[in-house]
Amino acid sequence: MAVALYDLSVANYLQTLGGVESFLSRGMAHCKERNIDPNEIVETRLFDDMLPFRFQIFVVAHHSIGAIRGVQAGLFTPPGQLPSLDYAGLQKVVTDAREALQKITPAEVNALEGKDVVFEVRDMKLPFTAEGFLLSFSLPNFYFHATTAYDILRTKGVPLGKRDFLGRMRMKS
């Protein structure tokens, strides 16, 4: 049985974006319960040489809806200057990405198979096919940044578990 590009990419983005929305909500609730300003988390880093929470969340959106749009255009680049968003603004970025992805049809994504895509950063250009880009570059980056954001919330004491990260699984009906 062949698996469609949509199912390998967008379906996974949607599942994890749902998980990210959930753990961001749990983080907000944790802050409210403990009278903590959630915006204190926005610039939190796991280590000094890692980018902050706001970058992790912004790039989750960039490597989901942004990746699909990049494949459609044939060009994907790193995000530009990141907006200075508060915690609620970061939640909106994730929700907006999920809602935009929900509007993309399986036929639109499946039609991209075999399409040339270039990842361009500064003077470096890496050539991919759509499926090579999504499966070997974008999805691993997406999961890395979602996991890092989750881990930052855990270091801040937010009571999260693996199910909070997984989102809604696609079980047999």
Image (spheres, grey):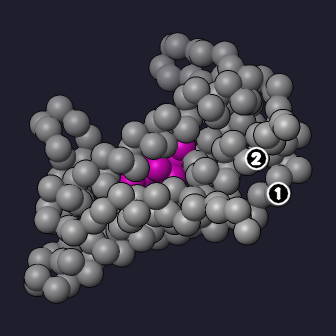
Q: Position of residue 127 (x, y in %)?
A: 66, 16
Above or below: residue 98 compared with residue 67: below
Question: Are the residues tagged 1 and 2 within 8 Å (C-beta)?
Answer: yes
Query: In what element is the residue under mark 2?
Result: helix
Above or below: residue 37 compared with residue 132: below
Magenta span dominant secondary structure: helix
Q: Is residue 106 magenta?
A: no
User: Dot 2 corresponds to which residue?
Assistant: 6
Q: Position of residue 89 (x, y in %)?
A: 39, 69
Q: Position of residue 166 (x, y in %)?
A: 46, 58
* Position of the N terminus by quadrant: top right
In the rendered structure, the answer to whether residue 11 lies left or right of residue 158 reads: right
Q: Residue at x 59, y 15 (%)?
A: 125
User: Dot 1 corresponds to which residue?
Assistant: 105
The answer to whether residue 89 is visible is no
Q: Looking at this view, name the residue that lies furthest to the front.
A: 172
- Looking at the picture, tell me which residue is in the foreground, 27 or 85: 27
Mark 1 neighbour density, 10 Å: few (under 14) some (14–19) many (20 or more): few
Q: Residue at x 77, y 58 (%)?
A: 104
- Looking at the picture, tell me which residue is in the foreground, 41 or 89: 41
Q: Residue at x 22, y 36 (%)?
A: 50
Query: In what element is the residue under mark 1?
Result: loop
The CA distance from mark 1 to mark 2 is 8 Å
Which range of residues does the magenta coloring cover? 55-63
Amino acid type at circle 1 is Thr
Amino acid type at circle 2 is Tyr
User: Where on the picture, by quarter, is residue 33?
Assistant: bottom left
Which badge, 1 or 2, comes first in the chain's sequence? 2
Mark 2 neighbour density, 10 Å: few (under 14) some (14–19) many (20 or more): many
Single out the mark in the foreground, 1 or 2.
2
